Image (spheres, helix red, strand yellow):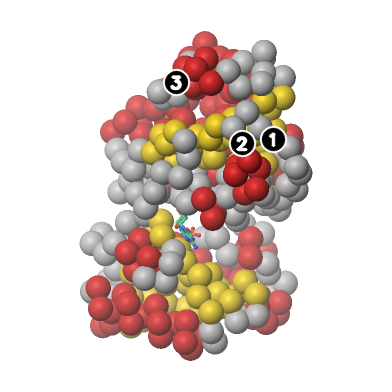
């Protein structure tokens, strides 16, 4: 299904776009690409609004992000589109606006997506939402900025085409994006290799604290708000830590629990080759993908860690 077909069919006079809470590279890249694409391919729709949470890091520099609105208003849209949102509760800034819109479309790639919109374009085989979007755009309206956003989305969710969610088609679609002259080397460098001093230090501290469980098959660690404060780190500085745990030799499951508010924790889980961590996270009301999933838990440090370890231990 092409974006142009959907627009032709629904004839919206205005369109809202939103991503998920705590937006990642796929979420931001997908949403900004769609915003830029609609502006270019459908200039007749003068009113396109992009709702994204305010972020701090490098993704801020993506073309189109500067046009995003960070607070919900009381508008009613003819069409509202979500990108990379796995369930309705996870819509970021504009949850109410989605509910009020005349028509809704959900574009996503999460296997756990229940199909919460009027039209659901969900490809669970796709490595990223950006990959789903690649096929929805007409070539004649593509440009370097749109391609940079899509490429950013792809590399964030596939770890630069190294996770098992990379399929031959992922690489073919990415190859097409290179045709637009995107600066892929610097996109990759800025996304994955560059780290602030604080980010390096909090990673060092957290990896040092981590322990192995289940005869070395699970690596797990918790990080409290007070520990983050000690290093001057915020939630946005923790992105790369769980994948480092997963790299440890012999480890199948990685668990990283970090405190987001007093006694309330976010858990990030990763697996290497057999375990379905989306199932483990679903036990706690979360979800995600086979190799990367998340959930939230309440309790103290020990309760949260023991709870997650028990479920993973059972599955292993
Ligand atoms: P993260 O560990 O935050 O990088 O998330 C990994 C994957 O799990 C992402 O694709 C998210 O969409 C999904 N995910 C993270 N947290 C949750 C949650 N609380 N509920 C459902 N899915 C989640
Ligand atoms: Mn995402
Ligand atoms: Mn995604």
Mark 2–mark 1 Cα distance, whole angstroms, equals 6 Å
In this orientation, does residue 152 appear?
A: no
Q: Position of residue 280 (x, y in %)?
A: 34, 68
Q: Which mark is residue 115?
A: none
Circles 2 and 1: CB distance less than 8 Å?
A: yes
Q: Quadrant of the N terminus?
A: top left
Q: Quadrant of residue 170?
A: top left
Seen in the image, is 188 located left or right of residue 132? right
Question: Is disc 2's CB within 8 Å of ligand 2?
Answer: no
Q: Is residue 165 left or right of residue 3?
A: left
Q: Is residue 283 above or below residue 118?
A: below
The kind of secondary structure element at disc 1 is loop
> Which one is earlier in the sequence, the residue at label 2 or at label 1?
1
Nearer-the-camera pick, 171 or 313: 313
Circle nearer the viewer, 1 or 3: 1
Residue count near mark 3 (Cα–Cα under 10 Å), binned few <14, some 14–19, many ≥20? few
Disc 3 element:
loop
Residue bearing mark 1 = 76
Question: Please, is residue 4 above or below residue 204 in the view?
Answer: above
Q: To which quarter of the image does residue 175 belong?
A: top left
Foreground of the two, 3 or 215:
3
Residue 101, disc: 2
- The residue at 70%/80% (across/down) is 230
Spot occupied by residue 263 in the image (x, y as percentages of width and height): 60, 81
Which label number is shown at residue 2? 3
Gap in Å between the C-alphas at discs 1 and 3? Answer: 24 Å
For the residue with label 1, is its CB less than 8 Å from the closest atom of ligand 2? no
């Amino acid at each position: 299904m092409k974006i142009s077909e959907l627009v032709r069919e629904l004839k919206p006079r205005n369109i809202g776009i939103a991503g998920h809470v705590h937006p990642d590279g796929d979420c931001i890249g997908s949403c900004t690409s769609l915003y830029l694409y609609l502006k270019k391919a459908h200039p007749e729709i003068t009113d396109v609004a992009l709702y994204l949470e305010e972020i701090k890091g490098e993704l801020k520099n993506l073309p189109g992000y500067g046009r995003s609105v960070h607070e919900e208003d009381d508008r009613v849209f003819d069409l509202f589109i979500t990108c990379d949102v796995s369930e309705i509760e996870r819509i970021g800034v504009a949850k109410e606006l989605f509910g009020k819109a005349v028509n809704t479309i959900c574009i996503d790639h999460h296997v756990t997506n229940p199909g919460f919109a009027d039209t659901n374009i969900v490809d669970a085989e796709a490595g990223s939402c950006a990959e789903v979007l690649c096929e929805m755009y007409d070539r004649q309206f593509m440009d370097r900025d749109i391609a940079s956003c899509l490429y950013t989305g792809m590399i964030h969710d596939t770890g630069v085409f190294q996770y098992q969610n990379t399929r031959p088609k992922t690489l073919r679609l990415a190859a097409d994006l290179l045709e637009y002259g995107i600066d892929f080397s610097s996109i990759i460098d800025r996304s994955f290799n560059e780290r602030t001093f604080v980010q390096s230090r909090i990673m060092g501290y957290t990896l040092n604290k981590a322990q192995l469980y289940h005869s070395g098959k699970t690596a797990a660690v918790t990080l409290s708000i007070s520990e983050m404060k000690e290093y001057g780190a915020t939630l946005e500085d923790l992105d790369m830590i769980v994948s480092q745990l997963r790299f440890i030799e012999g480890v199948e499951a990685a668990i990283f629990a970090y405190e987001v508010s007093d006694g309330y924790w976010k858990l990030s889980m990763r697996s290497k080759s057999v375990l379905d961590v989306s199932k483990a996270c679903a036990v706690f009301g979360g979800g995600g993908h086979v190799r990367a999933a998340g959930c939230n838990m309440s309790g103290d440090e020990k309760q949260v860690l023991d709870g997650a370890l028990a479920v993973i231990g059972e599955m292993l």
